[in-house]
Image (spheres, rainbow, N blue to C red):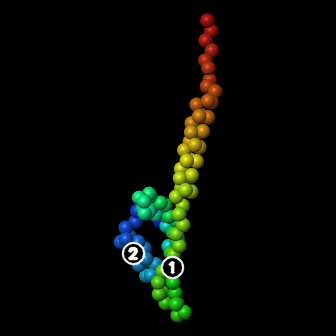
Amino acid sequence: MILVGGILSSGELAKIDEEIIATGRPKLNIVDTIIDKIGNNRRLLSNKMPLFDKNKKIIGIVGISIDITQRIEMEEKLNFHIQELVSNVDEKKPRKRKCINL
């Protein structure tokens, strides 16, 4: 499952955690935006999964997040340049010329 969002509220994060506890299934590839200490938006890729005790009872949630801000920025720049190249190629395609006999 992939969840892609903007800035998730604490209520939305709690809902994800509650679903993990209720179902016993992980939530993988959650893409979210957070605001860092100096006010910059950062994009995170997170995985959360239930934590079981020796009796297979869910006792919590364990998760990991990685900052993918630079990757997303580079992908956006790459896509922009690809579109620029495609439009430049389209503009330079030879056009059919009409011959006019005088």
Q: Quadrant of residue 89?
A: top right
Compared with residue 28, is residue 81 higher up or lower down, i.e. above or below?
above
Along the viewing direction, whichever of 35 and 68 lies nearer the viewer: 35
Under tag 2, what secondary structure? helix
Instruction: Depth check: give the residue in front, 2 or 79.
Output: 79
Give the residue at the far top of this rendering. 102
Find residue 90 and report its horizontal and vertical position in percent: 59, 34
> What is the three-letter code of the residue carrying label 1?
Val
Check contact, mark 1 vs mark 2: CB within 8 A: no
User: Image point 44% across, 57% down: which residue?
Assistant: 40
Disc 1 packing (10 Å; few <14; some 14–19; many ≥20): few
Q: How many numbered discs sit on the rendered protein? A: 2
Under circle 1, the secondary element is strand
Q: Is residue 5 visible?
A: no
Taking 74 as reference, is 49 above or below it? below
The three-letter amino acid code for the residue at tag 2 is Ala
Q: What x and y, as percent, mark residue 17? A: 43, 77
- Where is 75 relative to 101, above or below? below
Q: Which residue is mark 1?
A: 62
Of callouts 1 and 2, the N-terminal one: 2
Distance CA(mark 1)–CA(mark 2): 13 Å
Residue 63 placement, left or right of 10: right
- Identified at 53% across, 63% down, the residue is 67
What numbered label is drawn on residue 14? 2
Q: Position of residue 43 (x, y in %)?
A: 49, 61
